[in-house]
Amino acid sequence: MSDLSSIEKKKLERALGMSSGYVLQFSNRTFEDFFAEICGVEIYDEKYNFNSGSKANRMRAFWEIESNYLVSRILIALREEWSEYAGYSALPPPEDFNKIIQRLSSSIPVPEINAIRPNSDDKDFESLAKAVRESIERNEPEAGLDRLHTFLIKYFRTLCEKHKLDTSRDKPLHSLVGEYMKVIKTKGLIESEITERILKSTISIMEAFNTIRNEHSFAHVNKVLNYNESLLIFSHVTSSVRFIETIESAKVENTPLPVFDDEIPF
């Protein structure tokens, strides 16, 4: 459950116009679609049927039941498209609204967990990414290590395919990462030496992650890695993926790439 204080709830209710039983200008259908799209929640599920079952009461139930992570995702989505949901003549959300989002976001154990998104139109990939995110929503990073490893293999294999690199099934995670890192260096997407060093270290970290997946995760009958070290792995991996997403979204000329040998270092 979220840890919204009673004062924070009152401020949010005021900003969202919930005293009338409504939430901004949502209809029942758009309210249902909004929660399903943003966080995969069926807001008309019986568990959110608080008191009258109005949209406002369902929002209150959502705050009571769900984690800071999911509550912050909903509030961020509302803020980003405020005019669409509140009406184009409405004033922007008050500063208190932003402060509440900031506090909730800062309490999430892996702030960059939203970076765990599929980079292809594969429904199974989306289900996998959702399972990884849910392990953090439940604050159980150790339970999600094997799925995080699988996600990374699919994620980097997709990137390598996009850049026409070898993605044979027997190629391990760190090899896929290493070849992709060569690509972004060749394209001139790395500006500083320290960024290059950080990315080089990511290759060896991914190699070590293979061992964690095989010997310290639920992929096999193992003694699972402890909570704090699992959290560290999640934090490093998600920040790396977020950075890569900024690279992939950049507009870069399509320059020819050299043929690389099988060695991993740049």
Image (cartoon, helix red, strand yellow):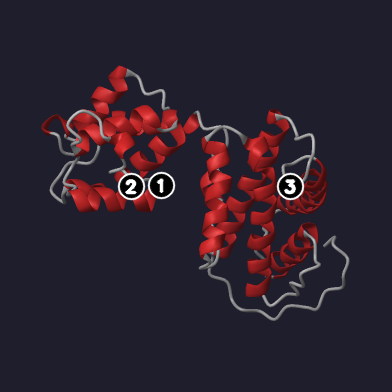
**Residue type (three-letter) at the residue carrying disc 2:** Phe
- Name the residue located 61 percent from the left edge and 79 percent from the top edge: 254
- Name the residue located 66 percent from the left edge and 79 percent from the top edge: 255
Q: Is residue 9 visible?
A: yes
Where residue 240 is drawn, which disc sits there?
Answer: none
Name the quadrant containing residue 93.
top left
Name the quadrant containing residue 75.
top left
In terms of secondary structure, where does tag 2 sit? Answer: helix
* Residue tagged 3: 219
| CB under 8 Å between discs 2 and 1 | yes
**Residue type (three-letter) at the residue carrying disc 1:** Cys
Camera-nearest label, 2 or 3: 3
| CB under 8 Å between discs 3 and 1 | no
Camera-nearest label, 3 or 1: 3
Where residue 39 is drawn, which disc sits there?
Answer: 1
In terms of secondary structure, where does tag 3 sit? Answer: loop
* Residue tagged 2: 35
Left or right, 68 with respect to 17, comes to right
Whole-percent x, y for residue 167 in the image: 74, 72
Whole-percent x, y for residue 192 in the image: 70, 53
Quadrant where the C terminus is found in the figure: bottom right
Left or right, 214 with respect to 242, comes to right
**Residue type (three-letter) at the residue carrying disc 3:** Ala
Number of marks in the rendered image: 3
Give the residue at the far top of this rendering. Answer: 6
In terms of secondary structure, where does tag 1 sit? Answer: helix
- Name the residue located 26 percent from the left edge and 30 percent from the top edge: 12
Q: Distance of mark 3 from mark 1, alpha carbons?
A: 26 Å
